[in-house]
């Protein structure tokens, strides 16, 4: 049950950010798409939104990475959010770094550009807690503009 919850936490947060993303990096427009391991290649997603407090547009950039400095059967999924002014690139308040899940043993993803259909993000997440393993695949189609 604990392994399943860690996979669900990771899937929820990645799915949430991917739904809002206008840009997902790295991404491929090749078939079959490349698969990236989050322990060696970060997943970066960004989107612009209106900031009503000062009538500007801000860019939120979210980076996911696995903290591999711990035991390989207990990697921690780290989510970092940076907020910048769209025109100047100057940092704005907000953002931060958070641990989303732990006990992650593997997280791979593909971000495929589909001509005329936008982007499809697929991530495979595995967690291991006390000898019990859980693996799930999440597929997200971000909003189109």
Image (tube, rainbow, N blue to C red):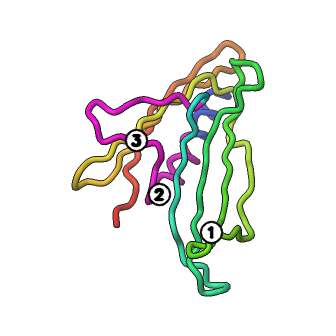
How would you rate the neighbour count of disc 1 (Cα within 10 Å): few for under 14, some for 14-19, many for 20 or more? Answer: few
Nearer mark to the viewer, of 2 and 1? 1
- Extreme right residue here? 70
Asked if the stretch drawn in magenta spans residue 111, the answer is no
Image coordinates for residue 52, horizontal then vertical, percent: 61, 84
Q: Residue at x 22, y 55 (%)?
A: 116
State the residue in front, 103 or 18.
18
Quadrant in which residue 102 is drawn: top right
| Residue 20 vertical position relative to residue 141 in the rendered view, above or below | below
Start-end of magenta stretch: 11-38
Q: In the rendered image, which quarter contains the N terminus?
A: top right
Q: In the rendered image, which quarter contains the C terminus?
A: bottom left
The residues tagged by marks 2 and 1 sit, at their Cα atoms, a distance apart of 18 Å
The answer to whether 19 appears left or right of 4 in the picture is left
Asked if the stretch drawn in magenta spans residue 32, the answer is yes
Q: Circle 1 sits on which residue?
A: 89
The kind of secondary structure element at disc 1 is: loop
The residues tagged by marks 2 and 3 sit, at their Cα atoms, a distance apart of 12 Å
Q: Circle 3 sits on which residue?
A: 111
The answer to whether 100 appears left or right of 107 in the picture is right
Q: Which mark is residue 21?
A: 2
State the residue in front, 72 or 126.
72
Q: Residue at x 62, y 22 (%)?
A: 105
Image coordinates for residue 43, horizontal then vertical, percent: 54, 42
| Residue 89 vertical position relative to residue 3 in the rendered view, above or below | below
The kind of secondary structure element at disc 2 is: loop
């Amino acid at each position: 049950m604990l392994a399943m919850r860690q996979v669900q936490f990771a899937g929820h947060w990645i799915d949430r950010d991917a739904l809002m993303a206008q840009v997902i990096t790295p991404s491929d427009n090749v078939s079959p798409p490349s698969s990236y391991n989050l322990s060696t290649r970060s997943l970066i997603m960004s989107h612009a939104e209106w900031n009503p407090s000062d009538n500007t547009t801000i860019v939120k950039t979210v980076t996911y990475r696995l903290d591999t400095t711990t035991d390989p059967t207990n990697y921690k999924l780290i989510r970092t959010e940076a907020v910048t002014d769209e025109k100047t690139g100057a940092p704005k308040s907000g953002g931060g770094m958070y641990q989303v899940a732990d006990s992650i043993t593997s997280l791979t993803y593909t971000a495929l550009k589909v001509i005329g259909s936008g982007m499809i993000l697929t991530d495979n997440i595995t967690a291991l807690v006390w000898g019990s393993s859980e693996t799930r695949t999440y597929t997200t189609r971000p909003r189109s503009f």
